[in-house]
Image (cartoon, rainbow, N blue to C red):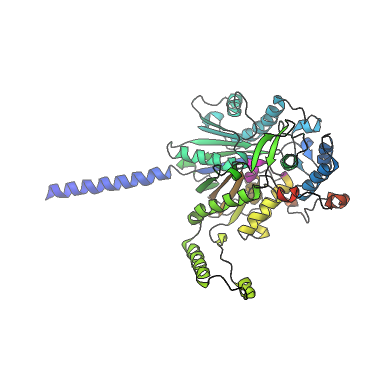
Amino acid sequence: MDLLCILSSLLISYLIFKIWKRIDSKRDQSCYILDYQCHKPSDDRMVSTQFSGEIILRNKHLRLNEYKFLLKAIVSSGIGEQTYAPRLFFEGREECPTQQDALSEMEEFYIDTIKKLLERNKLSPTDIDVLVVNVAMLNTTPSLSARIINHYKMREDIKVFNLTAMGCSASVISVDIVKNIFKTYKNKLALVVTSESLSQNWYSGNNRSMILANCLFRSGGCAVLLTNKRCLSGKAMFKLKCLVRTHHGAREDSYNACVQKEDELGRVGIHLDKTLPKAATRAFVDNLKVITPKILPVTELFRFMLSVLLKKLRGNPSKGSTAVAQAAPKAGINFKTGIDHFCIHTGGKAVIDAIGYSLDLSEYDLEPARMTLHRFGNTSASSLWYVLGYMEAKKRLRRGDRVFMISFGAGFKCNSCVWEVVRDLNVGESLGNVWNHCIDQYPPQSIVNPFLEKYGWIREEDDHDTFKIREEAM
């Protein structure tokens, strides 16, 4: 009998140990954001609408219609007067860039951001275990990640990932890589470096489907410090709750919606196809189908299912009951039941408006994305972090709040994730917030571009519908 009791006790102890070990291993797989640093280029790189017009005017291949088309795109884009461009634009060399121009643009970014991030957190470059770099439009040898390792003299056993051509949604992809590494390796520090190279990607032709990208993208970047160290969880800012990636590259129309190619004269640029809005919508809907059950409460999902069921039971209204059809309740999910803040990629005014309409968001919800587009422009994959910085600078983030990040990219991709705020971020402790110098000025009374009044002739109807089709870039 005593032997049976001993064996039973050992068995129970073993089961408890295995359960505890399983729970303990899961805790070590958590992905936290310790800190992040967005890049603010120097003021001598600041671009106004007037200067943008001067740059466009230097393109001798443009006719009046194309020039008017681009000016209309600029003043209607939601981009303000204080965004940033590479230095060669101010030197008038955008049509003949060198590789050194692109490398200098990237060096100015990562030397500034990574240095500030490490110093603020009292870390050495040798403390970094994982480095993930994403810059879509620059591919050099050695890679940009190798250049960062060389500059900061990082360890020889550091795990390195260098992503190119992943578009504006690459930040979430980089986080996904880190998340998966954390599932295997414990007690690690990861550095995600995200930016875009504009120096070598100016399109000098006059193809309407390709010249629009010249107007919408601006210089920027961000360095993000992540960890799965349990001892640092109390210092963390955010904890990753879930992440979903949707890729429609197998669909021909989605694949061709946004492509780097040569025009008929051999000039390279980004072609934005008329199928872009449809491709973006389809990817967005498919992404929401997967992530919605992960982030919303059961009660809201049940309410939505009941609403859809009742709508089907009612059937299609007869031709004579148009008024009844218009008065019928619209079945939709209230994302605010599980999400407190919406961090939307600043692909353009139309992108922000479309997501706001689809998710039934208020102007308060859209304000961080609109103000980021206005102050910093579309900085590609790094734009999400400027939006997050705005929320933090406005002291909106409280412990337990959930932040929904949504991004799009060529391919065609829609990637999203949800972060939980680990501690209150309303005490102004983040000295490195890129918004600190101007947050009191936002939101301004109006973000209407002053050139709308100064150059009223650009409001005239264009003889093509290209502007309406390709109003915004990813």
Per the picture, the main secondary structure of the magenta-coloured stretch is helix
The residue at the point 53 percent across, 46 percent down is 246
Residue 346 is situated, as x and y percent measured from the top left of the image, at: 67, 47
**386 vs 318, nearest the viewer:** 318
Q: Is residue 245 magenta?
A: no
Residue segment shown in magenta: 376-385
Residue 125 is situated, as x and y percent measured from the top left of the image, at: 56, 29
The residue at the point 51 percent across, 47 percent down is 243
Furthest residue in direction front, as rendered: 319
Picture quadrant where residue 141 is located: top right
Residue 228 seen in the figure = no
Q: Is residue 394 above or below residue 228?
A: below
Q: Is residue 418 above or below residue 151?
A: below
Picture quadrant where residue 247 is located: top right
The residue at the point 50 percent across, 52 percent down is 290
Residue 180 is situated, as x and y percent measured from the top left of the image, at: 47, 39
Quarter occupied by the C terminus: top right
**384 vs 214, nearest the viewer:** 214
Q: Is residue 284 left or right of residue 301?
A: right
